[in-house]
Image (cartoon, rainbow, N blue to C red):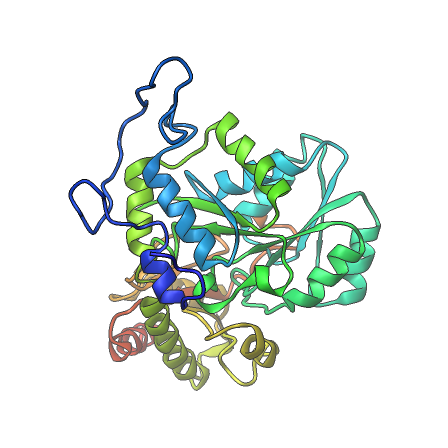
Amino acid sequence: MSTQGTGFNTRAIHAGQAFEPRTGAVVPPVHFSTTYAQDGIGGLRNGYEYGRGTNPTRDSLQEQLAAVENGTHAFTFASGLAAEDSLIRALMRPGDHIVLGNDAYGGTYRLISRIFGDWGIGNTPVDMADPQALAAAIAAAQTRLVWLETPSNPMMKITDIAAVAKATHDAGALLVVDNTFATPYLQQPLDLGADIVVHSTTKYIGGHSDVVGGAVIVKDADLAEKIGFLQFAAGAVNGPMDAFLTTRGLKTLGVRMDRHSENAQKVAEWLQGRPEVEKVLYPGLPDHPGHELAKKQMKRFGGMVSVQFTGGEAAARTIAESTRVFTLAESLGGIESLMNYPSEMTHASVKGTELAVPENLLRLSCGIEDAEDLIADLEQAFTRL
């Protein structure tokens, strides 16, 4: 069926998911073949030649992702960082520059600074909410990309995508938005002026902590051609089973994000009233500095909550090691609740830099369990302080 003009959940379920014509199977088969028979030399059947370049299961996922992000082309990869790596190599050359948020995900900053830094690509971290600082950073070098996370990981800052897009385009650069935290269900960066959206599909899109992947989505055909060439030529693609699992997860993204958001709101409100807590970072709270902007550019506020403790690092570590429903682990966005101590886990690579995460901070990925059980779990952990 055509999904043009349909709602988000309809696109998520049906885009790229036509039933199999020979048997009528409602769920398309997973295509494991690495190569495809040719009708004579160069006689490709529907363009399929070799698994690195094309695979029907991956193509279905890519069509699905483009549909839910309101893009025209999507490209999937073996991980979120593989997607970012291919994007940067497709669009940048030695001497170019990236301006990124000064609270960016540690893995992204490590890739840009330590891998591409040696390749001659510079970077400037900046407060994306400061228009003057952003404009100065863009103008100070040969800026090719501006890299934005909103909400940011793990400081939960909210940035005006449309305003950053205007500043970026005024300087002749391209805006990349990492939409992993918000997901396409809650936020549509391409509609707000972004040129490129990236995802770690490992997180909410896959949604079940059982498949690693990444994606890049664009509207512009020239950008798509360059990124598609890197996907084919460098080959950091996801396999067919990974693509299938990601597709299966994406079909339920909308209903899961509603529950993630409801649980996170309840957890954040409970945390806000605790004397052990110094600050709760969640855009759904009215006193969050980005609350009004988040209401404007997001459908709901998402499932991620960060919390800072009055007892400092020791308190944060004690809570992280005392929960029973929240699991102490890397990653986020799965149906189960996870807790992370970013300073020593996901953001250890930025310790000692201006991107360093406060040592009294925990990041909570609120799953879809019963909210009362999540709060009870935190309450029993707080008794250890």
Given the current orientation, which residue lies at the most extreme left position?
Answer: 23
Given the current orientation, which residue lies at the most extreme top position?
Answer: 41
Task: Report the quarter where the N terminus lies.
Answer: bottom left
44 or 223, which lies in front? Answer: 44
Q: Whole-percent x and y of residue 382? A: 34, 75
Give the quadrant of residue 329.
bottom left
Q: Is residue 114 above or below residue 19?
A: above
Q: Whole-percent x and y of residue 39? A: 33, 18
Q: Is residue 184 above or below residue 271?
A: above
- Residue 345 shows in this picture: no
Looking at the image, residue 232 sits to the left or right of residue 98; the answer is: left
Task: Report the quarter where the C terminus lies.
Answer: bottom left
Say which residue appears at 62% left-offset and 50% top-offset.
352
78 or 264, which lies in front? Answer: 78
Q: Whole-percent x and y of residue 104? A: 59, 55
Say which residue appears at 80% left-offset and 53% top-offset.
171
193 or 361, which lies in front? Answer: 193
Q: Whole-percent x and y of residue 29? A: 22, 41
- Residue 282 shows in this picture: yes
Query: How many marks do you count on the picture?
Result: 0
